């Protein structure tokens, strides 16, 4: 288990002058992949449902998993800080301290971080499943991403389990639900909190035995 020093104050350390520059090797970049439906993380070649684990922790664990330490380096500790470079890209500054032959060293490495969204295996299987309702999230003004974050903050386990797909387009985001009851309940919860424009229609509408059939389409404009 890697020992991480959190919130420590880095004091001035004497630098070991040596010919080798590879006492510590880390990857130039790491990729953090998150399922855009259920939030599972791609860790060590498989999708894992983990709660209360920050992006910073995921980045740190991935860097340390791939890091290579010189055998002469002992008593080392490490810490990580996330930031953005001048181009707005996510970067991680990871700092190491340790000893080589009783000399204290301090090394910092910069690692680029790629944050990706994908569908996990479980959610991928839902793509081909039946859906009975679509909630079309649109915005009247402001950032669509902010409205999406607000909308998804209402997701319960029931909502997540009923999602069969999410499609992002130029006009907004479409959420496909297996159950129209769940979709309608979700929209009702949201409009009870904020003002919104809601319109319902049916996709592939027809009459069968006197009843309206088709996929329920709910346009929600925040």
Image (cartoon, rainbow, N blue to C red):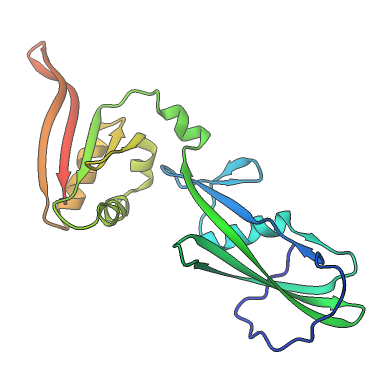
- Compared with 220, 91 (above or below) is below
Image coords of residue 110 (percent x, y): 63, 65
Q: In terms of depth relative to the viewer, which is nearer, 98 or 7?
A: 98
Q: Is residue 176 visible?
A: yes
Residue 54 showing in the rendered view = no
Hey, which quadrant is residue 146 in on the image? bottom left
Give the left or right position of residue 6, taking residue 82 as reference: right
Residue 18, how many percent across, how many down? 87, 75
Tell me if 182 is positioned left or right of 93 in this view: left
Q: Is residue 152 above or below residue 26?
A: above
- Spot the residue most to the left: 210
Residue occupying image coordinates x 81% and y 64%: 22
Image label count = 0
Along the horizontal axis of the image, is 116 left or right of 170?
right
Front-most of 88 and 100? 88
For the point 35% across and 42% down, the residue is: 158
The part of the image, by quadrant, that contains residue 215 is top left
Identity of the residue furthest to the bottom in this view: 12
- Residue situated furthest right in the rendering: 101
Where, by quadrant of the figure, is residue 168 drawn? top left
* Image position, residue 198 (x, y; %): 11, 43
Q: Position of residue 184 (x, y in %)?
A: 20, 39
**In this orientation, which residue lies closer to the viewer: 98 or 179?**
98
Which residue does the image show at 10% across and 10% down from the upper left? 209
Camera-side residue: 218 or 172? 172
Residue drawn at x 17%, y 47% as measured from the top left:
188
> In which quadrant is the N terminus drawn?
bottom right
């Amino acid at each position: 288990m890697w020992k991480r020093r959190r919130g420590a104050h880095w004091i001035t350390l004497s630098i070991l002058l040596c010919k080798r520059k590879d006492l510590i090797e880390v990857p130039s970049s790491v990729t953090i992949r998150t399922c855009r439906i259920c939030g599972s993380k791609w860790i060590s070649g498989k999708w894992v449902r983990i709660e209360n684990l920050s992006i910073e922790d995921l980045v740190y664990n991935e860097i340390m998993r791939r890091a290579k330490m010189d055998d002469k380096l002992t008593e080392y500790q490490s810490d990580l800080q996330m930031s953005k470079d001048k181009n707005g890209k996510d970067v991680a500054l990871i700092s190491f301290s340790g000893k080589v032959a009783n000399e204290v060293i301090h090394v910092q490495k910069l690692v680029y971080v790629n944050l990706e969204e994908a569908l996990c295996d479980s959610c991928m299987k839902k793509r081909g499943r039946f859906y009975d309702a679509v909630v079309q999230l649109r915005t009247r003004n402001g950032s669509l991403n902010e409205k999406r974050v607000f909308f998804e903050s209402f997701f319960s386990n029931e909502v997540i389990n009923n999602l069969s797909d999410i499609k992002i387009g130029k006009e907004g985001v479409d959420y496909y639900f297996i159950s129209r009851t769940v979709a309608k309940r979700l929209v009702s919860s949201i409009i009870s909190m904020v003002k919104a424009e809601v319109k319902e229609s049916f996709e592939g509408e027809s009459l069968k035995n006197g009843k309206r059939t088709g996929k329920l389409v709910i346009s929600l404009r925040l």
